[in-house]
Image (cartoon, rainbow, N blue to C red):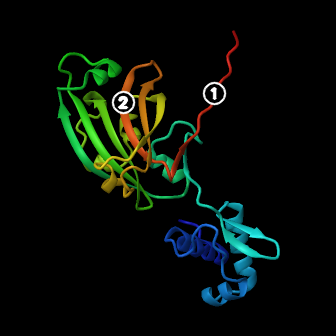
Amino acid sequence: MAKKQSVFQEVAKQIQEKIDKGLYVSSQRLPSEYDLAKEFGVSRLTVRKAIDELISRNILVKQKGKGTYVMTQQKIQSGRAGLQGFTEAAKSYGKTSKTEVIRFELVTEIPEEVTRALELNDQEATYHIVRLRSYDNEPMTVEDLYIRSIYLPEVTEKQLKGSLFELIEKQIEIAYSHQEVEAILVTKELSPLLKVEAGEPLLMVHSITYSVTATPILYDISYYRADRYTFKNTLHRTTT
């Protein structure tokens, strides 16, 4: 049985929903505690606790003598909790993800680069999947994926609307991924999908995902909105 939220947590949730919907925007000053208490029908103490909760989650910031403001919207940070799929990353931020499957086909004619990367045998059946991923209903990334069919047996288009990593790990354990990030410009094809003007900055991420035994599992070229996504990597210093 789910634990019932306290009154101040419910108020905090409603304030955050207003921020998510754009009713309160980055750097905007919130109404006074008195006005918020009147709006939500609660005490000023309850409002104060709700604001403190959102401050602790880096959603609001209080400036002494000037009021409470919405913090500049943070970018989603890939890699902040290790190797995660998009669905897992969204959950870690307390958000929801949505997936639209644009292409889903079993192919035998595969680009040479993909064949080498996945170490495919001649004419080995491989899935080509293109998905549009959204974060709280905001388009965030377009994924162009190739994966050997043995790792997605009897998969359906409906299943591909969820976590691909979760489906893969029913067959083989995912261990790590090599990524290369490149800055490019939004193309006319990607513009309507990501709802970003053509010519705006975009992050193209080329990655190959492996099992513990270094078996290549997934070949992925994804296009991320540069205004809403960033990547975190850990670099290890080597000595000569």
Of all residues shown, which one is farthest toward the top?
Answer: 240
Mark carried by residue 172? none
Mark closer to the chain start, 2 or 1: 2
Q: Is residue 11 above or below residue 2?
A: below
Q: Return the x and y of residue 14 as percentages of the image width and height.
A: 56, 75
Q: Is residue 137 above or below residue 183?
A: below
Q: Say left or right for 176 vs 60.
A: left
Instruction: Report the residue at 76% width, 81% height from top.
Output: 45
Of all residues shown, which one is farthest toward the right?
Answer: 65
Residue type indicated by callout 2: Leu
User: Distance between the Cα atoms at labels 2 and 1?
Assistant: 23 Å
User: Where is the C terminus found, in terms of image quarters?
Assistant: top right
Q: Say left or right for 154 vs 178.
A: left
Residue with the mark numbered 1: 235
Instruction: Report the residue at 33% width, 53% height from top.
Output: 191
Q: Nearer the viewer, residue 16 or 23?
A: 23
Mark carried by residue 218? 2
